[in-house]
Image (cartoon, rainbow, N blue to C red):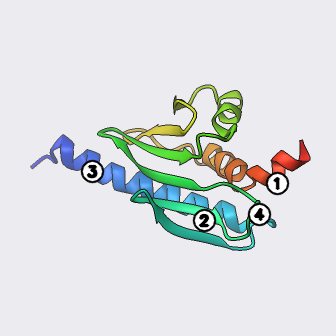
Amino acid sequence: MRDSPDLVNLYNMHKHLDILATQIRKTAVQLDEVTELVETQKWGQQSFLPKKPRVGTTIRIDQHDDSHVAMYVHCQTTLVDTYRSLFPELTYEGNRAVLFNVNEPLPKDTIDVLVEEALLYHVNKRKR
């Protein structure tokens, strides 16, 4: 018996969200400025932010549509512009999200850079 496409997509969706959450945690641990990572729910989405204020900005992850998960950042930051300049091959939604197709492998090394930029957004902004 073959799995239905809907079940495969649902499985891939959850798998990709789990991988994204794990990558965010792993990256945060490696950043000296992020002494503690807070995990919470914002707008019903799994969210991550440095506990210490003015270090970084919140990252939210969630299903975007039937075939994509998204990593959202605050739309009033310049993060998505930075992401676009570093990784033009990725898919974006406006100035707030990077989209990942659930039927393709996640680019973990790229995600690490995206996460680091977000979790150190305010620190990096002060350096520029």
Q: CA distance from mark 2 to mark 3?
A: 23 Å
User: Which residue occupies the foreground of this view, 49 or 5?
Assistant: 49
Q: Is residue 91 above or below residue 59?
A: above
Tag 1 secondary structure? helix
SS at circle 3? helix
- The tag on residue 31 is 4
> Tag 2, which secondary structure?
helix
When asked about the image quadrant of residue 26, the answer is: bottom right
Q: Mark 3 — residue?
A: 10
Which of discs 3 and 1 lies nearer the camera? The answer is: 1
Query: In the rendered structure, which disc, 1 or 4, sits on the residue that comes first in sequence?
Result: 4
Compared with residue 15, is residue 93 higher up or lower down, i.e. above or below?
above
* In this picture, residue 54 sits left or right of residue 6: right
Asked if the residue under mark 1 is in contact with the one under mark 3, i.e. CB atoms within 8 Å, the reply is no
Give coordinates of residue 2: x percent, y percent: 13, 46
Q: Nearer the viewer, residue 69 or 44?
A: 44
Kindly indicate whether the residue at mark 3 contacts the one at mark 2 (C-beta within 8 angstroms): no
Dot 1 surroundings within 10 Å: few (below 14), some, or many (20 or more)? some
Residue identified by numbered label 1: 123
Quadrant of the drawing holding the C terminus:
top right
Q: Earlier in the sequence, mark 3 or mark 1?
A: 3
Q: Which residue is mark 2?
A: 25
Q: Which residue is painted at 65% across and 29% down in the image?
A: 84
**Dot 4 amino acid type:** Leu
Of the numbered discs 4 and 2, the one sitting upstream in the chain is 2
Discs 1/4, front: 1
